[in-house]
Every structure is written in structure tokens, then in C-alpha cells.
Image: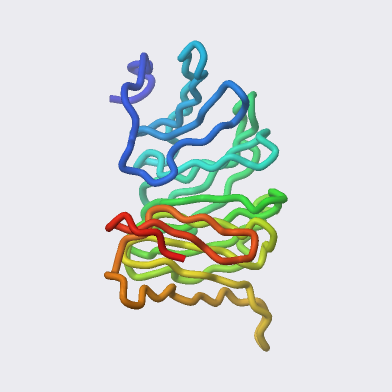
Amino acid sequence: IGQECCSLHYVYGGDTGRSGNLSMIDDRTVIYTVGNAVVLENVFDNKKKYIMAIDEGGVGCVSVHPSRTMFAVGGRGHKPNIYIYSYPDLKILKVLKQEAERGYASLNFNQSGTKLASVAMAPDYMLTVWDWEQERVMLHTKAFGQDVFSVTFSVDDDNRLTTSGTGHIRFWKIASTFTGLKLQGQIGKFGKVDLSDISAYIELPDGKVVSGSETGALLL
């Protein structure tokens, strides 16, 4: 049934299976994805606005710009795009094209908002750093061989990133080589701790990273 034959009335529930699927975009509004829609919900009166997916497979993820005047939406489907929307007028400003085979699992802006990092879903799991204002890929490489849940820039260094997911956490740096800038990643070693999926982590001021684990233990 095409959208010309019907109109959206309401979206029920929320997708709790997605990592990091809730952000504040202003003092009254949260933004999250569910099904084929991005939802902007006023937490005081529960009124909702919807942005329907443009790509055929729906919405993969969403990330709010540090200025809170924009947000990015990663699509799902065959060669989906990333769409940069203005807020609160919800107009498309930029389109970042086709750096994922089937969809985006996570997006994140750096602290100054000049760069955007994306991680693709299966089967390619590509990590890409974008100059989103120019709609241009700066760097890309394979992030891992299994599902990657999240990607973030370091709080105080745009040249460092962290990704995590099924059975791993990985620490990246943008390094200068003879052939130009490259993304170089090191896997976090679990040592005597059992291999674990890493769903959440945070970077400390000294550059160390604390993550959760499946057993409930905190890993430094």
C-alpha cells in the first residue's frame, strides 16, 4: 500500500533492541527510531512528530548534532543514505550517499560537529568518517567482522574513535602514513575476562575507557 493511499495515525512502542536509541534534542523533546519512522516526542505532553523513512528498508539509527539544530538519520535497505535534517523545521540539508550495503547501525558527530562517523550493518560493517557539510567521505575501513553496535569520537581528540559490538571493543586513531591519512584500530584485550559483547562504554578524562560486559563486570 503506497503512502498516497493512507496516512500515518500513530506509532506505538519503541525499539529497545537498538543500542543508544534515545537522545535529547532540546529541553522538552526526545528523538528515537521505531520501525520505519523517526519520532520526536515532547516529554511533557507526549505529543509526537514523525519523519517517515526515505529508504526502502526503514530507519537504522539517528544522532543529534552538538548544536541541537540538526540531526542525522541513517537509512536501511539497498545502498541507503544518511540524511542531515534541520531542527525544528525538519528540512533535509545534506544527503550522504551509499557507504553501506544494507543499512547503518550507529552514527555520531564529533564534539565540534564538523565530522560524522558512521558504522554499517551486516554484511560490510564499514566504519566511515564524513565531512558531512561537503557530503564527502574522508576515511573508511572495515570496523569488524561481526555486528558493531556503536561508534563515538573522543571527547577531546577528533583523531580518536571507539567502536564496540559483538565480542569486541576497538580503539581507533586517524594516523598519518606515507600514503595519507588512515584509520588504524586496536582490539581491546579481555585478558582473563570471558569474551563479551560490549553494548556501552564511556571515555574518561585521561583517555582510558570504561565499558560494561555481559557478566555485569566493568572493564577498564
Q: Is residue 182 above or below residue 12?
A: below
Q: Percent from the top left, x then y, of residue 42?
A: 52, 18
Where the N terminus falls, by quadrant? top left
Task: Tell me how the rendering is colored.
Answer: rainbow
Who's the residue at 56% across and 66% down the image?
A: 208
Q: Percent from the top left, x then y, of residue 52?
A: 44, 29
Residue 189, quarter of picture: bottom left
The total number of labels drawn is 0
Q: Percent from the top left, x then y, of residue 64?
A: 58, 40
Q: Nearer the viewer, residue 119 or 189?
A: 189
Q: Percent from the top left, x then y, of residue 102?
A: 36, 54
Task: Note whether residue 118 is visible.
Answer: no
Who's the residue at 67% across and 88% down the image?
A: 178
Q: Does residue 62 appear left or right of residue 14 in this picture?
A: right
Task: Note whether residue 115 is visible.
Answer: yes
Who's the residue at 39% across and 46% down the image?
A: 19
Q: Does residue 171 appear left or right of residue 13 in this picture?
A: right
Residue 196, quarter of picture: bottom left
Q: Does residue 33 appear left or right of residue 158 in this picture?
A: left
Residue 214, quarter of picture: bottom left
Of all residues, the one furthest to the top in this rendering is: 45
Q: Is residue 82 above or below residue 125?
A: above
Q: Is residue 124 above or below residue 97?
A: below
Q: Does residue 91 appear left or right of residue 1 in this picture?
A: right
Who's the residue at 60% across and 35% down the image?
A: 85
